[in-house]
Amino acid sequence: MCGIIGYAGHRPAVPVIIEGLRRLEYRGYDSAGVGFIQGRELKVIKAEGKLAALEEKLAHYPNTVAMNGIGHTRWATHGVPAERNAHPHIGGNNELAIIHNGIIENYQEIREKLTKSGYRFYSQTDTEAAVKLIDSYYKQSGEPLTAISQAMLRIRGSYAFAMMFRDFPDSLFVARKDSPLIIGQNGDGCYIASDVPAILDSTRTVYYIDNLEIARLKPDSIALFNIDKEPIEKTPS
Ligand code: GLU
């Protein structure tokens, strides 16, 4: 399981994400990637190897205006270390992107069912099955929270997910089961991380997300829900 970072706030997101990923480098990884929404388009940029390779690619993109985004360092469990298997993985017509720590145990079964309904897969990962499953529910409801909670009922295994939806550009969504995930907040915005050190310099206000909980983050707010989409209250640590 490797590194997750997300940021929704008032500063350009990509440098915040790269900085956070750098703090998680000690865990080891084989590839890295970021996702952000710019000009109504969801952009995903990934590179095999070290963060420097990702930064080199990012230098070609005018990404400084995106104020929220997600980033990942991958340690492959399903599929070789390669750019196409790196996260974020995308669903729909580039409508949603997901990063994932953990293992989806029933990904083959999900993949086969979705293939029968017309889905095509570009990677070898278990994670792509999750994003396409969420996409299939999102197509029905048009509502991220509903789609995520429906997918959580189907997925077996462990996950910390961070997600973006192109048509909800001010929000990040997270969900978790058996893989660590925290949310932090300061005057600049809200942060997602798989590990405390990644955001320790930015904030000391941290919410621990428990199993089968979902959160929606905006620059100035954090809303938490159980798997039935009922709001829950949490005291920050
Ligand atoms: N199982 C996922 C993959 O192989 C996530 C790996 C990770 O936790 O870094 O892509």
Image (cartoon, rainbow, N blue to C red):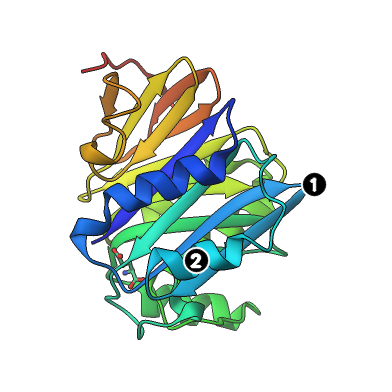
Residue found 46% across the figure and 22% down from its top: 222
**In the depicted view, which residue is nearer to us: 126 or 164?**
164
**Amino acid type of the residue that numbered disc 2 sits on in the rendered structure:** Leu
Q: Quadrant of residue 191?
A: top left
* Image position, residue 207 (x, y; %): 28, 25
- The quadrant of the rendering that contains the N terminus is bottom left
- Left or right position of 1 against 226: left
Residue under pointer 2: 54
Residue found 59% across the figure and 67% down from its top: 57
* Image position, residue 85 (x, y; %): 45, 77
Tell me the mark number nearer the camera, choosing from 1 and 2.
2
Residue under pointer 1: 39
* Image position, residue 121 (x, y; %): 56, 81
Q: Is residue 138 above or below residue 76?
A: above
Q: Secondary structure at mark 1?
A: loop
Q: Residues within 10 Å of mark 1 (few under 14, many from 20)?
A: few
All told, the count of numbered labels is: 2
Of the two numbered discs 1 and 2 on the same chain, state the one appearing first in sequence.
Answer: 1
Residue found 50% across the figure and 18% down from its top: 221
Answer yes or no: is residue 214 visible: no
Q: Is residue 37 above or below residue 115?
A: above
Quarter for ligand 1? Answer: bottom left
